[in-house]
Protein backbone atom coordinates (compact mmCIF):
# COMPACT_ATOMS: atom_id res chain seq x y z
CA UNK A 1 0.00 0.00 0.00
CA UNK A 2 1.08 3.62 -0.55
CA UNK A 3 0.95 6.56 1.85
CA UNK A 4 1.04 10.21 0.78
CA UNK A 5 3.09 12.48 3.06
CA UNK A 6 2.44 16.22 3.19
CA UNK A 7 5.35 18.23 4.65
CA UNK A 8 4.76 21.77 5.88
CA UNK A 9 7.26 23.00 3.31
CA UNK A 10 7.74 21.41 -0.10
CA UNK A 11 5.72 19.09 -2.29
CA UNK A 12 3.88 15.97 -1.06
CA UNK A 13 5.54 12.62 -1.78
CA UNK A 14 4.45 8.99 -1.76
CA UNK A 15 6.17 5.96 -0.18
CA UNK A 16 5.22 2.29 -0.38
CA UNK A 17 4.79 0.63 3.05
CA UNK A 18 3.81 -2.84 4.30
CA UNK A 19 0.47 -3.57 5.96
CA UNK A 20 2.25 -4.46 9.25
CA UNK A 21 4.83 -1.63 9.38
CA UNK A 22 5.13 0.33 12.61
CA UNK A 23 5.27 4.13 12.57
CA UNK A 24 8.97 3.93 13.42
CA UNK A 25 9.59 1.70 10.38
CA UNK A 26 7.70 4.21 8.21
CA UNK A 27 9.88 7.03 9.54
CA UNK A 28 12.97 4.99 8.64
CA UNK A 29 11.69 4.70 5.07
CA UNK A 30 11.19 8.48 4.94
CA UNK A 31 14.80 8.84 6.13
CA UNK A 32 15.96 6.46 3.38
CA UNK A 33 14.11 8.13 0.50
CA UNK A 34 13.88 11.77 1.65
CA UNK A 35 16.97 12.03 3.89
CA UNK A 36 14.96 13.45 6.81
CA UNK A 37 16.36 12.29 10.20
CA UNK A 38 13.96 10.06 12.14
CA UNK A 39 14.43 12.15 15.27
CA UNK A 40 13.11 15.25 13.49
CA UNK A 41 9.96 13.62 12.09
CA UNK A 42 6.47 13.90 13.57
CA UNK A 43 3.67 12.11 11.70
CA UNK A 44 0.07 13.29 12.20
CA UNK A 45 -3.13 11.63 10.94
CA UNK A 46 -6.70 12.63 11.76
CA UNK A 47 -5.31 15.33 14.06
CA UNK A 48 -3.47 12.73 16.16
CA UNK A 49 0.31 12.41 16.54
CA UNK A 50 1.27 8.83 15.65
CA UNK A 51 3.46 7.04 18.21
CA UNK A 52 6.48 5.08 17.01
CA UNK A 53 5.27 1.74 18.43
CA UNK A 54 1.82 1.87 16.78
CA UNK A 55 1.25 0.03 13.51
CA UNK A 56 -0.74 0.80 10.36
CA UNK A 57 -3.82 -1.17 11.45
CA UNK A 58 -3.97 0.51 14.87
CA UNK A 59 -3.68 3.97 13.28
CA UNK A 60 -6.43 3.14 10.70
CA UNK A 61 -4.16 4.14 7.82
CA UNK A 62 -5.53 3.26 4.39
CA UNK A 63 -3.99 2.96 0.95
CA UNK A 64 -3.19 6.53 -0.21
CA UNK A 65 -4.03 8.07 3.15
CA UNK A 66 -2.67 11.62 3.52
CA UNK A 67 -0.31 11.95 6.52
CA UNK A 68 1.01 15.30 7.72
CA UNK A 69 4.79 15.43 8.22
CA UNK A 70 6.18 17.94 10.70
CA UNK A 71 9.94 18.42 10.53
CA UNK A 72 11.59 19.89 13.61
CA UNK A 73 14.41 22.41 13.29
CA UNK A 74 16.99 23.38 15.89
CA UNK A 75 14.90 26.31 17.11
CA UNK A 76 11.83 24.10 17.71
CA UNK A 77 13.40 21.23 19.63
CA UNK A 78 11.85 22.31 22.91
CA UNK A 79 8.62 23.62 21.44
CA UNK A 80 5.57 21.35 21.69
CA UNK A 81 4.07 20.18 18.39
CA UNK A 82 0.62 21.58 17.66
CA UNK A 83 -1.51 18.72 16.32
CA UNK A 84 -4.46 20.76 15.04
CA UNK A 85 -3.73 22.12 11.56
CA UNK A 86 -7.02 23.94 10.91
CA UNK A 87 -8.97 26.43 13.01
CA UNK A 88 -12.23 24.86 14.16
CA UNK A 89 -15.35 25.95 12.30
CA UNK A 90 -18.52 26.87 14.20
CA UNK A 91 -20.24 23.68 15.35
CA UNK A 92 -23.90 22.86 15.70
CA UNK A 93 -24.83 23.00 12.00
CA UNK A 94 -26.79 19.79 11.36
CA UNK A 95 -27.83 18.30 8.04
CA UNK A 96 -29.04 14.98 6.64
CA UNK A 97 -27.15 12.82 4.15
CA UNK A 98 -28.28 9.74 2.24
CA UNK A 99 -25.81 6.87 2.52
CA UNK A 100 -25.83 3.93 0.12
CA UNK A 101 -24.33 1.11 2.22
CA UNK A 102 -22.39 -1.97 0.96
CA UNK A 103 -25.64 -3.97 1.29
CA UNK A 104 -27.27 -1.57 -1.24
CA UNK A 105 -29.57 -0.05 1.43
CA UNK A 106 -30.18 3.71 1.55
CA UNK A 107 -29.80 5.16 5.04
CA UNK A 108 -30.43 8.75 6.07
CA UNK A 109 -28.09 10.03 8.78
CA UNK A 110 -28.04 13.32 10.67
CA UNK A 111 -24.48 14.66 10.84
CA UNK A 112 -22.73 17.77 12.12
CA UNK A 113 -20.95 19.95 9.55
CA UNK A 114 -17.72 19.60 11.56
CA UNK A 115 -17.92 15.79 11.73
CA UNK A 116 -15.09 14.00 9.93
CA UNK A 117 -15.39 11.23 7.37
CA UNK A 118 -14.07 8.90 10.09
CA UNK A 119 -17.04 9.88 12.30
CA UNK A 120 -19.40 9.13 9.41
CA UNK A 121 -17.87 5.64 9.14
CA UNK A 122 -18.46 5.08 12.85
CA UNK A 123 -22.13 6.01 12.43
CA UNK A 124 -22.43 3.55 9.53
CA UNK A 125 -20.92 0.80 11.68
CA UNK A 126 -23.58 1.47 14.31
CA UNK A 127 -26.41 0.67 11.89
CA UNK A 128 -24.77 -1.81 9.49
CA UNK A 129 -22.77 -5.00 10.05
CA UNK A 130 -19.58 -3.95 8.26
CA UNK A 131 -15.84 -4.53 8.94
CA UNK A 132 -13.48 -2.12 10.67
CA UNK A 133 -12.91 1.44 9.37
CA UNK A 134 -9.76 0.57 7.47
CA UNK A 135 -11.83 -1.37 4.90
CA UNK A 136 -14.63 1.16 4.42
CA UNK A 137 -14.38 3.53 1.44
CA UNK A 138 -16.52 6.69 1.31
CA UNK A 139 -17.13 8.33 -2.08
CA UNK A 140 -18.98 11.48 -3.12
CA UNK A 141 -19.62 11.84 -6.88
CA UNK A 142 -17.05 9.09 -7.48
CA UNK A 143 -14.26 10.78 -5.45
CA UNK A 144 -12.85 8.95 -2.42
CA UNK A 145 -12.92 10.99 0.79
CA UNK A 146 -10.15 10.80 3.41
CA UNK A 147 -10.82 10.02 7.10
CA UNK A 148 -9.43 13.31 8.41
CA UNK A 149 -11.57 15.52 6.16
CA UNK A 150 -14.52 17.43 7.62
CA UNK A 151 -17.83 16.79 5.88
CA UNK A 152 -18.33 20.50 5.19
CA UNK A 153 -14.89 20.66 3.50
CA UNK A 154 -15.79 17.71 1.25
CA UNK A 155 -18.73 19.57 -0.25
CA UNK A 156 -21.26 17.38 1.57
CA UNK A 157 -24.51 19.21 2.28
CA UNK A 158 -28.19 18.55 2.97
CA UNK A 159 -29.43 15.41 1.12
CA UNK A 160 -26.05 14.66 -0.46
CA UNK A 161 -25.86 11.03 -1.59
CA UNK A 162 -22.77 9.17 -0.44
CA UNK A 163 -21.58 5.76 -1.65
CA UNK A 164 -20.01 3.33 0.84
CA UNK A 165 -18.04 0.29 -0.35
CA UNK A 166 -15.52 -2.18 1.07
CA UNK A 167 -11.87 -1.99 0.09
CA UNK A 168 -10.70 -5.39 -1.27
CA UNK A 169 -7.93 -7.15 0.61
CA UNK A 170 -4.59 -7.71 -1.16
CA UNK A 171 -4.50 -10.42 -3.84
CA UNK A 172 -1.87 -13.15 -3.28
CA UNK A 173 1.32 -12.44 -5.26
CA UNK A 174 2.96 -15.53 -6.83
CA UNK A 175 6.49 -16.08 -5.56
CA UNK A 176 9.01 -16.15 -8.41
CA UNK A 177 11.80 -18.63 -8.73
CA UNK A 178 10.08 -21.66 -7.19
CA UNK A 179 11.82 -24.82 -8.36
CA UNK A 180 11.46 -28.55 -7.78
CA UNK A 181 13.06 -30.32 -4.83
CA UNK A 182 16.42 -31.99 -5.42
CA UNK A 183 14.75 -35.37 -5.14
CA UNK A 184 12.43 -34.51 -8.04
CA UNK A 185 9.37 -34.93 -5.85
CA UNK A 186 10.21 -38.53 -4.91
CA UNK A 187 10.17 -39.87 -1.35
CA UNK A 188 8.62 -38.44 1.80
CA UNK A 189 9.11 -34.73 2.53
CA UNK A 190 10.44 -33.82 5.95
CA UNK A 191 7.79 -32.01 7.98
CA UNK A 192 8.12 -28.30 8.65
CA UNK A 193 7.73 -26.93 12.15
CA UNK A 194 6.17 -23.46 11.95
CA UNK A 195 4.75 -20.98 14.43
CA UNK A 196 1.18 -19.80 13.88
CA UNK A 197 0.56 -16.32 15.30
CA UNK A 198 -2.86 -14.96 16.27
CA UNK A 199 -4.22 -11.53 15.39
CA UNK A 200 -2.10 -8.67 16.84
CA UNK A 201 0.60 -11.20 17.80
CA UNK A 202 -0.87 -11.93 21.22
CA UNK A 203 -0.33 -15.69 21.03
CA UNK A 204 1.74 -18.24 19.07
CA UNK A 205 1.47 -22.00 18.82
CA UNK A 206 3.80 -24.49 17.06
CA UNK A 207 2.39 -26.60 14.22
CA UNK A 208 3.85 -29.27 11.92
CA UNK A 209 2.98 -29.25 8.21
CA UNK A 210 4.06 -31.20 5.16
CA UNK A 211 5.77 -28.98 2.54
CA UNK A 212 3.57 -30.52 -0.17
CA UNK A 213 0.30 -29.90 1.72
CA UNK A 214 -1.96 -27.05 0.66
CA UNK A 215 -2.27 -24.08 3.03
CA UNK A 216 -5.95 -24.94 3.43
CA UNK A 217 -4.93 -28.02 5.44
CA UNK A 218 -3.52 -25.72 8.13
CA UNK A 219 -6.92 -23.99 8.37
CA UNK A 220 -8.62 -27.38 8.93
CA UNK A 221 -6.13 -28.39 11.64
CA UNK A 222 -6.55 -25.09 13.49
CA UNK A 223 -10.32 -25.47 13.45
CA UNK A 224 -10.02 -29.01 14.86
CA UNK A 225 -7.71 -27.79 17.63
CA UNK A 226 -10.09 -24.97 18.50
CA UNK A 227 -13.01 -27.35 18.77
CA UNK A 228 -11.11 -29.35 21.35
CA UNK A 229 -9.02 -26.85 23.29
CA UNK A 230 -9.46 -23.27 21.98
CA UNK A 231 -5.68 -22.92 21.77
CA UNK A 232 -5.69 -20.04 19.29
CA UNK A 233 -8.55 -17.54 18.78
CA UNK A 234 -9.76 -17.46 15.15
CA UNK A 235 -11.73 -14.48 13.76
CA UNK A 236 -15.34 -15.61 13.37
CA UNK A 237 -15.89 -13.33 10.36
CA UNK A 238 -13.16 -15.07 8.31
CA UNK A 239 -9.39 -14.92 8.06
CA UNK A 240 -6.40 -15.64 5.83
CA UNK A 241 -2.69 -16.35 6.36
CA UNK A 242 0.41 -14.25 5.72
CA UNK A 243 4.02 -15.49 5.72
CA UNK A 244 6.96 -13.19 5.13
CA UNK A 245 4.57 -10.32 4.26
CA UNK A 246 3.06 -12.37 1.40
CA UNK A 247 -0.63 -13.32 1.44
CA UNK A 248 -0.97 -17.12 1.26
CA UNK A 249 -3.31 -18.90 -1.15
CA UNK A 250 -5.21 -21.80 0.47
CA UNK A 251 -4.97 -23.79 -2.79
CA UNK A 252 -1.16 -23.53 -3.01
CA UNK A 253 1.34 -25.66 -1.07
CA UNK A 254 3.68 -24.52 1.68
CA UNK A 255 6.56 -25.35 -0.68
CA UNK A 256 5.04 -23.06 -3.34
CA UNK A 257 5.02 -20.26 -0.75
CA UNK A 258 8.68 -21.03 0.16
CA UNK A 259 7.80 -21.65 3.81
CA UNK A 260 10.95 -22.69 5.67
CA UNK A 261 11.66 -24.45 8.93
CA UNK A 262 10.78 -22.19 11.88
CA UNK A 263 8.88 -19.57 9.85
CA UNK A 264 5.99 -17.66 11.42
CA UNK A 265 2.57 -17.72 9.73
CA UNK A 266 0.29 -14.86 10.81
CA UNK A 267 -3.50 -14.85 10.95
CA UNK A 268 -5.17 -11.77 9.47
CA UNK A 269 -8.88 -10.92 9.66
CA UNK A 270 -10.87 -10.76 6.40
CA UNK A 271 -11.04 -12.48 3.02
CA UNK A 272 -8.71 -12.61 0.02
CA UNK A 273 -10.24 -11.63 -3.29
CA UNK A 274 -9.59 -13.83 -6.30
CA UNK A 275 -6.81 -12.65 -8.60
CA UNK A 276 -7.11 -12.29 -12.34
CA UNK A 277 -6.55 -15.54 -14.29
Image (cartoon, rainbow, N blue to C red):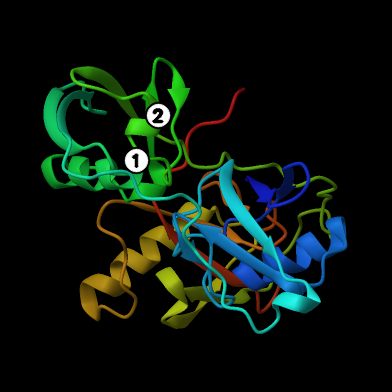
**Residue shown at the point (78%, 46%) measured from the top left:** 10
- Given residues 183 and 223, the one toward you in this image is 223
Q: Residue at the top extreme?
A: 141
Rendered location of residue 85, percent (x, y):
51, 54
Of mark 1 and mark 2, the one earlier in the sequence is 1
Residue 224: quarter of image: bottom left
Q: Of tags 1 and 2, which is closer to the observer?
A: 2
| Along the viewing direction, whichever of 137 and 277 lies nearer the viewer | 137
Q: Residue 101's spot in the image, x, y percent?
A: 23, 28
Residue at the spot 46% in from the left edge and 36% down from the top edge: 168
Q: Real-space Cα distance between discs 1 and 2?
A: 9 Å
Q: Do the CB atoms of the residues marked 1 and 2 lie less than 8 Å apart?
A: yes
Which quadrant, please, contains the C terminus?
Answer: top right
User: Residue placed at 76% from the left, 41% from the top?
Assistant: 11
Name the residue tied to disc 2: 154
Residue 89 visible somewhere in the drawing: yes
* Image disc number at residue 80: none
Q: Is residue 29 above or below residue 197?
A: above
The answer to whether residue 195 is left or right of residue 256 is left
Q: Residue 123 at what x, y percent from top left?
A: 19, 44
Image label count: 2
115 displayed left or right of 189: left
Give the quadrant of residue 242: bottom right
Instruction: Provide the secondary structure element on which disc 1 rests.
Output: helix
Q: Which residue is mark 1?
A: 117
Q: Nearer the viewer, residue 178 or 100?
A: 100
Q: Under tag 2, what secondary structure?
A: helix
Amino acid sequence: MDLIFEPEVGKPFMIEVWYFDTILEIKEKIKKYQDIPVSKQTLIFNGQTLSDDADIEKCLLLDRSHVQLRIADDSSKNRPVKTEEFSPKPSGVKFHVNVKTPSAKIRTLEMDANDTVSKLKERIQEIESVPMNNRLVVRLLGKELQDNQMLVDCGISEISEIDISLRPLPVPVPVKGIGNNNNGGRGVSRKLRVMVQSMCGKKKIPMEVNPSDKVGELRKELQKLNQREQLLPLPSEGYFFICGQNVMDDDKSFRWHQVAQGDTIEIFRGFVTAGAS
